[in-house]
Image: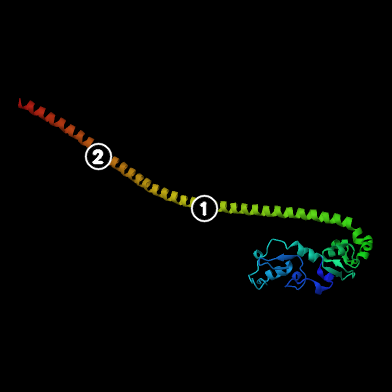
Amino acid sequence: MISSSFYEYIDRESIDSDLICSLCDNPFIDPIVTQCGDTYCRLCIEKDMGNGSHCPSQSCNQLLSTDHLTLNPPPRLVVSMLDKLKVRCQLCEKTNINRGTFDEHIKTSCSEYRKDCPGKNIGCQWFGSKNEHDEHTKTCLFEKLRPMVDILYKIIENQSLDIEKLKKQIEQQTTEIGQLNTQVDQQKAQFEQQKTESKQQKIQLDQQKTQLEQPKAQLQQQQIQIGDIQSENQTQKNEAASIRNQFTILQEEINKLKSTALWLCK
């Protein structure tokens, strides 16, 4: 709705008090009904609600919230009475305008309503009355440049979309890189752990090798001892064989002596 600052009520004193908002003391604009049955301007009651106020009704005084507002619109009769209130345009001084049609008056017939140039969105700062508006629009340099500006805006819009896509791709790639870095860190940690385990296994192997070298040295020493014993045994065998030979020779000598003795005794 057009700002109420552009009009004033005619014969304000004659307006029914039931159509007056107790918060702003003006006829209702976009009226809304509360749970307690009172009616206020929507902006007025929402402003109080935003300030954490209680319901202005003395019979209610509940803390205002969205639950305190009804979804039911005000009676059509009330809306119709408000739309038919007579107002005077403060711009062109036209009078006896129904408030409900004031927006249409401003947009279509008010000669003094100040309008911005259609080229405002591309830089034109002109504004003026409706009578001047059409003439300015015909000669506005910004409007003449609009086709080119629209093309540039379209290019900028497309580039902005491309930039947003690239940003999303970069964010996605950044996420993927982060995940890959995490995987690399995990693999690196696993490698370090395996490296540590390999070192520990090598130490254990060296210890086992050392432990195996000791029995091997003992075995070699025992083999040397066995060789010495075998040499001693062989020496003893040789000595025993020599003794047996000597014993055999003696035995033969004894036998010879026995034979000689027997021969002499004959």
Residue at image point 84% right, 68% down: 86
Q: How many marks?
A: 2
As helix, strand or loop, the secondary structure at mark 2 comes to helix
Q: Where is residue 134? Give x, y as percent.
A: 93, 62
**Type of the residue with mark 1:** Gln
Q: Quadrant of residue 135?
A: bottom right
Left or right position of 69 against 216 = right
Looking at the image, which residue sits at the far left?
Answer: 266
Left or right position of 36 against 260 = right
Is residue 14 or residue 212 the one in the foreground?
14
Q: Is residue 123 visible?
A: no
Circle 1 Cα neighbour tier, 10 Å, few/some/many (<14 / 14–19 / ≥20): few
Q: What residue did someone put label 1 on?
A: 193
Is residue 138 or residue 141 the one in the foreground?
138
Residue at image point 22% right, 37% down: 240
Q: Is residue 141 visible?
A: yes
Circle 2 Cα neighbour tier, 10 Å, few/some/many (<14 / 14–19 / ≥20): few
Is residue 162 or residue 78 the one in the foreground?
78
Q: What residue did someone put label 2 on?
A: 236
Q: Where is residue 36? Give x, y as percent.
A: 66, 67
As helix, strand or loop, the secondary structure at mark 1 comes to helix
Q: Is residue 108 above or below residue 228?
A: below
Q: Where is residue 181? Give x, y as percent.
A: 61, 54
Residue at image point 87% right, 57% down: 149
N-terminal-most mark, 2 or 1: 1
**Marks 2 and 1, Cα distance to the nearest angstrom?**
64 Å
